[in-house]
Amino acid sequence: MSLFEIVLLIVSGVLVGFINTLAGGGTIISLSLFMFMGLPANIANGTNRIAVILQNITSVSEFGRKKMLDFKKGTALAIPTVLGAIVGAQIATDINEEIFEKALAIVMIVMVYFIVVKPSKWLKGQQNLMDKKVDWLQILIFFLIGVYGGFVQVGVGYFILAGVVLGAGFDLVRANAIKVWIVLLYTPMALLVFILNDQVRWDFGLVHSIGNIIGAYIASRFALTWGANFVRWVMIGIITFTVLHLFGIVDFQTVFHLKSLRG
């Protein structure tokens, strides 16, 4: 791995950790970068889980220290999510690489919608829902969210936030704390599935994690107060470039000569 690649992985990791802790969707950057650097889509998908775990350990620690995290409710919602993530990760490891790339491109296009409409504007807490126990509908919803998160991870934070705020009634800040706790609990199980299927590139994942930890720490200390509009346009640009790459319209590996920098 070259010095340029190391710096690129760390710097991009800071942005990913920051975005993922604020809301979600930063995984698009990780997957895009890994694929631009020559990793197949399925291995990029598995490798990304390393940084996700480490960034969320950081975020959970900070939210817990600030007493913003409802561990009891979060864990109850995480259990069906974990089960769903195992199913989703297995689907991702078994799927044909070309099909997976096209599916990932479609997911990214859908994510444009969530980013453009800025869901944080309509997510509001409701105390009556916060006081209710987790019901079967919530269990089903979070199982399905887990399947999605295990499959691709991209933008799962938006879906978890929607489920926690609209279904469980938490305000957006506390929902963010529960979100990172849920992701932290299910991601190791998904990572294990990818490891067993030999779809993890450890050097890329661990170096990228350095930046993720830094970004997560910054974002959890200043939760939801920085850069919403900046993040939105960065994500739209990243998605556009990645979709063009996945559909074979532009070969960014050739454009940026990243392959030639290896070794």
Image (cartoon, helix red, strand yellow):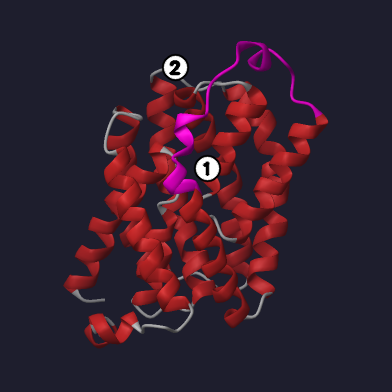
Q: Is residue 234 left or right of residue 114?
A: left
Looking at this view, is 251 or 205 the one in front?
A: 251
Residue 122 at x, y = what percent? 51, 29
Q: Alpha-carbon neighbours of circle 1 within 10 Å: few (<14), some, or many (≥20)?
A: many
First of labels 1, 2 by sequence position: 2
Mark number for residue 67? 2
Q: Is residue 51 above or below residue 134?
A: below
Q: Are marks 1 and 2 in contact (CB under 8 Å)?
A: no
Pointer 1: what residue? 158
In the image, what residue type sits under mark 1? Tyr
Give the residues drawn in magenta, as a range.
114-135
Q: Is residue 120 magenta?
A: yes
> Hey, which residue is sitting farthest right in the picture?
136
Please indicate, yes or no, whether residue 262 appears anywhere in the rendered image.
Answer: no
Disc 1 versus disc 2: nearer the observer: 1
Looking at this view, is 148 or 198 the one in front?
A: 148
| Residue at screen point 55% across, 35% down | 161
Looking at this view, is 52 or 247 the one in front?
A: 247
In the image, what residue type sits under mark 2? Lys
Q: Alpha-carbon neighbours of circle 2 within 10 Å: few (<14), some, or many (≥20)?
A: few
Mark 2 secondary-structure assignment? loop
> Mark 1 to mark 2: distance in Å?
22 Å
> In which quadrant of the rendered image does the N terminus lie?
bottom left
